[in-house]
Amino acid sequence: MKRFYAPQQASHAPELELHNGAFTAYAEVPQRAEMILAAIGGAVPPPDRGLAPIAAVHDAAYLDFLRDAPTLWRAAGRPGDAIPYAFPIVGRRPLALSRIDALLGAHAFDATTPITERTWDAAYWSAQTALAATHAVLEGERAAFALCRPPGHHAGRDYCGGYCHVNVAAVAAQAARDAGRARVAVLDIDYHHGNGTQDIFYDRGDVFYASVHADPASDYPFYWGHADERGAGEGEGATLNLPLPRGAALAGFRAAQARALDAIAAFGADFLVLSFGADTWEGDPISHFRLTTGDFAVLAGDVAATGLPCAIVMEGGYAVNALGANVASLLSGFEG
Ligand code: SP5
Ligand code: ZN
């Protein structure tokens, strides 16, 4: 299977995140990519397809903000990484504010997603990596793997969150649409609900979003991913949320994924983006499912059995020492 990764992605390395009332070490570390690369035998750098495929799913002002935030943060005299502390949850409307703290809060839904000097470049190249895998599949590969980091599925059109800045799965899905695939599906099997991907396509009937994830009643991102969220307008019925309780293992997860794949088949998808997080693994430090390393090959086998051309994009997975084996297992399930 073709595998893609850009060296520029490594430089995004925030120091701290706000978690349970204290600043703790950032979980989405560069070493994640190193471990995956070592386990899968390396990857090829993607070509630069420019800003347009990213701007197709993100607001231009948001992308400007991601690029400029570190400069504004420094200009305000701040050390360290840019982190928001005030959020317009009551009155979110287009105010022409320029204060860095106002911009940060207007473009984020949590305080766990710092922006560093290197974030924009890394997120840009993470998206180029997703595009390379997408185009490899559009050109005839059955499946291709994008080692995206930073991940993307919590990022919406104009906001970041959950370690995500540019929604690489949405960039991939939109690129497939723009290349002529009529009905694209995103299957999200990260432990967390992909609220950003859902938001981006919520009112569209041409991109189906299906997610198997930890019940947001107990787990981040809390405010999205409930079973009653099914899309709106032309997208009514084109969103499927399958929340599972903490402790879910292969049997429950596999049955939910089968429901998602049935719905994707009924939708008539002609292209699949697999938003893959290995944070469903039993030893993940921030998650509570019980998948084993071998289970990822089983789940991938079920996805491959649909026969859908599939671009795989990396999302979460924080057990650094097991991450390589878990990703290798997933890829083996596609190749087996
Ligand atoms: C892409 C993805 O999997 N994002 C997950 C974001 C989850 N954020 C909420 C939980 C944060 C836990 N952070 C633990 C830090 C330990 N130092
Ligand atoms: Zn996750």
Image (cartoon, grey):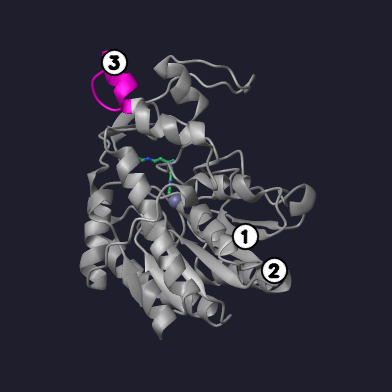
* Residue located at (34% from left, 55% from top): 48
Q: Position of residue 288 (x, y in %)?
A: 45, 53
Is 163 displayed left or right of 33 in the figure?
Answer: right
Label 2's element? Answer: helix
Report the Cα–Cα distance between label 3 and label 1.
Answer: 42 Å
**Magenta stretch: includes residue 74:** yes
Quadrant (top left/top right/bottom left/bottom right) for the C terminus: bottom left
Local packing at callout 3 (Cα closer than 10 Å; few below 14, some 14-19, many 20+) is few
Tell me which label, 3 or 1, sits earlier in the chain.
3
- Assess disc 1: are there few (<14), some (14-19) or many (≥20) residues with their C-alpha within 10 Å of its C-alpha: many
Which residue lies under the disc numbered 3?
75
Image height of 144 relative to 188, above or below:
below
- Mark 3 or mark 1, whichever is nearer to me: 3
Q: Residue at x 40, y 83 (%)?
A: 335
Disc 2 from disc 3: Cα separation:
50 Å
Q: Mark 1 and 2 residues: CB-CB less than 8 Å, in contact? A: yes
Point out which mark residue 311 bears.
none
> On the image, numbered disc 2 is attached to which residue?
263
Q: What distance separates the C-alpha of mark 1 from that of mark 2?
A: 8 Å
